[in-house]
Image (tube, rainbow, N blue to C red):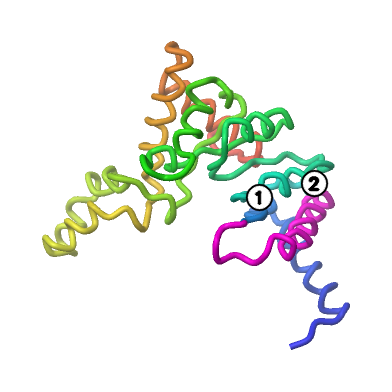
Amino acid sequence: MTIDDHDHTVMKRILTDEANAPWCAAVGECGLDASEGFPPIDDQIPWFRKQVELAEELQLPLFVHERLAFEQTMDVLKTTTVPVIIHCFTGTQDQCRQYIDRGYFVSVSGFILKENADNCDEVRKCLSEGILPLERLMIETDSPYMGFTNCRQWYVEHNQELISSALNSKKRKRLVQSMYPNVPTSLLGVLDKVVECLQQHDQSITKDQVAAATTANAKSFFGFKFGE
């Protein structure tokens, strides 16, 4: 298969048309990942730069994925003027500070509920030590990924009739105990842990306050109009 300039023009027009559609809230998920199994970072960077250029051209926010590629990500983003969110943050306290200093939003997932994962304590400390302020915070599940113990608890509790009729006891037990695939309703567990961490820095913070603030941040960042 070959791709000529005409093909690139057509592809860009398709992307531009999609990005201008009312349902398009951001450019992404895009970014850099130096984890095992991914292409070399030097091969990823040109594509990431093009995605940033597209976001600039269309004036859409950037929904950024960064894994083990902090310096390269910061370099690509250094001149961008559109809003940026670092999705599913798994970095260090110092990296979080630098993201916040740039004015980026940082999103926290069920990663903070993993006891043995690399850097999970670092992410919790970003919350408990006031590094990640509420006005720059969002929360997410990253489902079906980033599962954690009991991530399906709310789903199971509220769908007992459906689950009981569709699955035998062994499959029900596996459904409850397995961490994958993660489910969107695990957001409640993420919220609880985020509140617990934030309260170590400020005991006056409430669950309702965090839920309202992170929802408002998401609505503002992505231009959502629900609830208005």
| Neighbourhood count class around disc 1 (C-alpha, 10 Å): few under 14, some 14–19, many 20 upward | some
Q: Which residue is mark 1?
A: 69
Q: Is residue 140 magenta?
A: no
Q: Quadrant of residue 75?
A: top right
Label 2 Cα neighbours within 10 Å, binned few <14 / some 14-19 / many ≥20: some
Residue 161 locus on image (x, y percent): 17, 53
Mark 2 and 1 residues: CB-CB less than 8 Å, in contact?
Answer: no
Q: Position of residue 187 (x, y in %)?
A: 41, 40
Farthest top residue? 204
Mark 2 lies on residue = 59
Residue 57 seen in the current view: yes
State the residue at coordinates (49%, 40%): 119
Q: Say which of 196 and 223 sits in front.
A: 196
Q: Quadrant of residue 116?
A: top left
Magenta stretch containing residue 50, yes or no?
A: yes
User: Is residue 228 among the parts visible in the rendering?
Assistant: no
Residue 203 vs residue 87: left or right? left
SS category of the residue bearing label 2: loop
| Dominant SS type (magenta) | helix
- For badge 2, the amino acid type reads Gln
For the record, the magenta segment spans 34-58
Disc 1 residue type (three-letter): Ala
Q: Residue furthest right?
A: 5
Counting from the top left corner in percent of width and height, residue 72 is at 73, 49
The mark that comes first in sequence, 2 or 1, is 2
What quarter of the picture does the N terminus occupy? bottom right
Which numbered tag is attached to residue 29?
Answer: none
Say which element carries label 1. loop
Disc 2/disc 1 C-alpha distance (Å): 25 Å
Residue 174 lies left or right of residue 44; in this view the side is left
